[in-house]
Image (spheres, grey):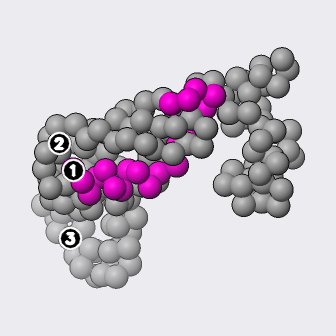
Amino acid sequence: GMVDSLAQLGSSSGSRAGRGGGGSAAIGGAAPGGSAGSRAEAPAAEPSRVDAMAALRRVQDPVRRCMGERREVARVEVTVRGTDGRITAVNVRAPFAGTPAEACITRAVRTATMPRSRRETYRFQHAFRPAPIAGTGSSGATGNAVRSRRARQRPALDQEMVDEAEAR
């Protein structure tokens, strides 16, 4: 009925607006009465790709530690139990399949909690890119954070490098 059509409108926008913006606290059920709130908010039939990607991005750092120095992309397919968002299986694809990193990546990925769904199970594929190499012109937020931290630690050295580059 009406509840179902609302749930399909998008797992984040439609359902959160009705709660007066207190949405972020209730997501994990940590807010007072969180369990009642999450029952009333029926999961979408199709989990949102954006929410699924965000859930897996939260385990990106441990996955990158598993990848070590390798520069390839780690592709995984996860099987998710729709009722609670638990990852029940992780399939690590080549080039990490069959390597010592595979078990490590599997363990790291399984710690993620995926979006719930009315489907009993669903699959989702995701690619974990290697961390940007320090000093390459990567525009990634992590690269910038590392560079700005370094700049604060050694402002003189960085300024010398800039002066040298301009002199050329």
Look at the image and give the residue range highlighted in magenta. Answer: 102-121
**Which residue carries the number 2 mark?**
97
* Position of residue 91 measured from the top left corner of the image (x, y, whole percent): 29, 38
Foreground mark, 2 or 3, reads: 2
Q: CA distance from mark 1 to mark 2?
A: 6 Å
Q: Which residue shows up at 26% across the image and 41% down it?
A: 92
Of 88 and 61, the residue lying toward us: 88
Please tell me in which quadrant of the rendered image residue 28 appears.
bottom right
Q: CA distance from mark 2 to mark 3?
A: 42 Å
* Drawn side of residue 120 relative to residue 35, left or right: left
Q: Are marks 1 and 2 in contact (CB under 8 Å)?
A: yes
> Hey, what amino acid is under mark 3?
Met
Mark 3 touching mark 1, by CB under 8 A?
Answer: no
Residue 142 picture location, percent across and down? 38, 59
Is 25 on the left or on the right of 165, as rendered?
right
Query: Taking 148 as reference, is 45 left or right?
Result: right
Could you tell me which residue is drawn at 45 percent across and 44 percent down?
Answer: 87
Residue topped by disc 1 = 102
* Type of amino acid under label 2: Ala
- Mark found first going from the N terminus, 3 or 1: 1
Evaluate whether residue 21 shows in this view: no
Q: Is residue 142 left or right of residue 3?
A: left
Q: Earlier in the sequence, mark 1 or mark 2?
A: 2
In the image, is residue 58 above or below residue 166? above
Question: What's the mark number on residue 161?
Answer: 3
How busy is the neighbourhood of tag 2: few (under 14 within 10 Å), some, or many (20 plus)? some
Q: Secondary structure at mark 2?
A: loop
Is residue 30 depicted above or below 154 in this figure?
above
> What quarter of the picture does the N terminus occupy?
top right
**What type is the residue that disc 1 sits on?**
Glu
